[in-house]
Every structure is written in structure tokens, then in C-alpha cells.
Amino acid sequence: MTLPQKVYFDRNENRYGPAPACLQVLREAAPELLFNYSRSFEQGSSSDLAARLARLHGVPEQKIILGYGCEDILKEAVHHFLPVGRAVAIPSASWWYYHAVAGEVGGVTVEYPLRPGANRYEYDVTTLISLREVANPALVLIASPNNPTGNSLGHHDLLRVLEAYRDVPVILDQAYHGFVAAESDAIGDLTREFPHLLVLRTFSKLHALAGVRIGYALCGDRLEAFRKYCARYLGFNRLSERLALAALDSTEYYGSVAAGIARSRQRVYEQFRSLPGCAAFESDANFVLVRMTPQTSALLERELPARGLIVKFLKEPGFEHHARISVGTEEETERLVACIAALTSQATARARALGESA
């Protein structure tokens, strides 16, 4: 018996894969990329990629930090900014790693709420701002879009938070930026206006380069000590830099990827909103949070893996009977949606037949 090919909808990877230009970089990579350190300093730069990102965002190159994805820079930031026993404000439903890395330095996590609306989660900005007086956090962490809820913090609300915490380091984690068409990208202006702001970006999600681990940050003007803390005298991974540069040159390709993911998100919304007692929350990322009845959740968690479809079913308090579905290509998403429709239809038919025979 041939087992069905597995499709992973559980870790928010971009299943479209990187741009053809990135694959060309791998094919043409010269050995000196591996055995020589960077020579970017000869052109007065810390790295070719940092210089390119500085031009892209309209900031001095000194405000760019490179790292091994957002995870690397996030860890450095929390270790640098969070004293033992001080509070860090963290979203109530977000990446588990935020709590873990705060615990590494003896920090105290204070949660501010995310609340579900009819079709979308929303940040409770008023409560977040009130934590300034209640918990006096030494650090504030905002994920926009947030994982697993998929919602972003609107520009007006972001300005409210940044103004309230103007003299406190704020980390804006934008790992999932770029999946919404015509999304605002004025982070260079934000870091000029708010000198304690640190914005995180990655090439892992939209650009489908998770396996080469590369990300970056933009620093506000008052974070000079942190920039020095993160400095790498011998440079960064030169092959990863070349791949990221090729991705930045491939805007048309990634625009088409974002459009395909938007269509796939819509298919997931439609499928779960058609099921009694289920809901799908609108997302600005490459995944959708869905809420199910206990019966539907148990059915799909049991049956989908046997069909080669791997979905992340959440177990955290408040998210029982929820799943976070990373949308794949349109073909993969259609396979998933069709399977869910067939399984739930069969279950409904069996329940009806049992009821009629009782």
C-alpha cells in the first residue's frame, strides 16, 4: 500500500519555495564564498546585504542588524534589554518562544490581551498602554502579524503604543510582513520617530528561505549599545546574504506568491465558515487560525495525518479545538480543503443515519 505524500501545513513554511534567482545563486556559488570572510569593508560597508537593506528602508547602514532569522535577534534583544526580575509585556496568545527566552534571563512575562471578534482577532491596545503604570515593563514585545491569530496591529494603534512607551525598548516582530498586498512599509520612518524601537524582519516566511536562517532588524537611534552588542567583526554568512539579495531582486515573483497565498487563505475561510459551529479568523500571514466544534476537531486530528496532511492542532488554554493551518500552494490547499469537506460530510451523514435509525 502506497502512503499518500505528506504535505506540511504545521510550521508556517512558504511551500511555494524561493524565487528562481535564489536557486541560481546556489548553482553559481563560487568556493570563495565559503572559504573567504566578507570583504565588504573595502567598499566602506559592513555587508552588501546590510547596505542594500539600508537603502531599501532609507536609513543609515549602522541601523541594520543581520541575524540568523528573527529568532536570533529576538534572543539577543531580550537578553540585552530585560533585567532579572523586570517585566516584559507579551501578547496573551503568541509564539511560545517569547516566554521561553524571557525566562532564560529571569524576566517576568506580563500578558496583554488579544480578543477574538466576529472574523478577526484584535489587540487590546488600551490594556497594553495601561501596563505602563501597572507593571512598569522594561521591554514591550508586539507581533504584527501575530502567530497564531494572524492579526496585525493597525498603524494608528501602533503609534499610540509607541508614544506611550517612547522611552522603553519596544520590539516589533514583523516576521510575517509582506503577505498583504500594498502593505505599508514605513519602518525606517518609525525608527527615526521612536528611538527605542527595534523592528524585526526575516527572509524565512514570504521569501521562503527558512532553511538558510537569515533575518534582520532596524534599530532606533537610542539603541546604539544594542547595535554594538550584536556586531559581528568577521561578517555574516556570505551565501545567505547572496540568497537574500536575490530575493530582494525578485519582487514580481514574491508578489505572485503573496497573491496565491491570499487566495488559499480565502478557500480555508470559506470551508470552515461553511461548517456548523466552526469559525475561521482573518489573517495577514501565511496561516489561518480556525475554531472547531470538539467533534470536528477530534475527527480532523485523527483522520488528516492518515491522509498525509499535517496540521497544527493547538493545545494551549483558551485554544482547545483550534488549529493553525499554514496555507500551502493553491493545489495543496485545494487537496486539504477537499479532504476536510469529504470527512465532515461523511461524519454528518453517519450521524444523521444513526439518528434516523434510533
Image (cartoon, rainbow, N blue to C red):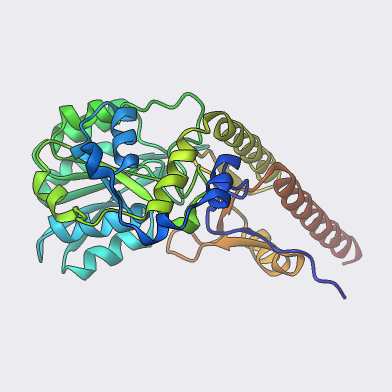
The x, y position of residue 174, in whole percent, is 36, 42
Which quarter of the figure is the C terminus placed in? bottom right
Task: Pick whichever, 28 or 210, lies toward us.
Answer: 28
Question: Against 56, is 50 above or below?
Answer: below
Residue furthest to the bottom:
1
Res 273 → quadrant: top right
Task: Please provide percent x and percent y for residue 38.
Answer: 30, 51
Residue for point 30% across, 40% down:
50
Residue 72 image offset from top left, x and y in percent: 31, 58
Vertical order, 322 against 196 (above or below)? below
User: Residue sitting at 44 percent across and 44 percent down?
Assistant: 244
Task: Give whichever of 128, 86 is nearer the camera.
Answer: 86
Specify the farthest residue to the right. Answer: 357
Residue 205 can be seen, yes or no: yes
61 vs 36, left or right, is: left
307 sits to left or right of 139:
right
Residue 49 x, y percent position in the rendering: 34, 41
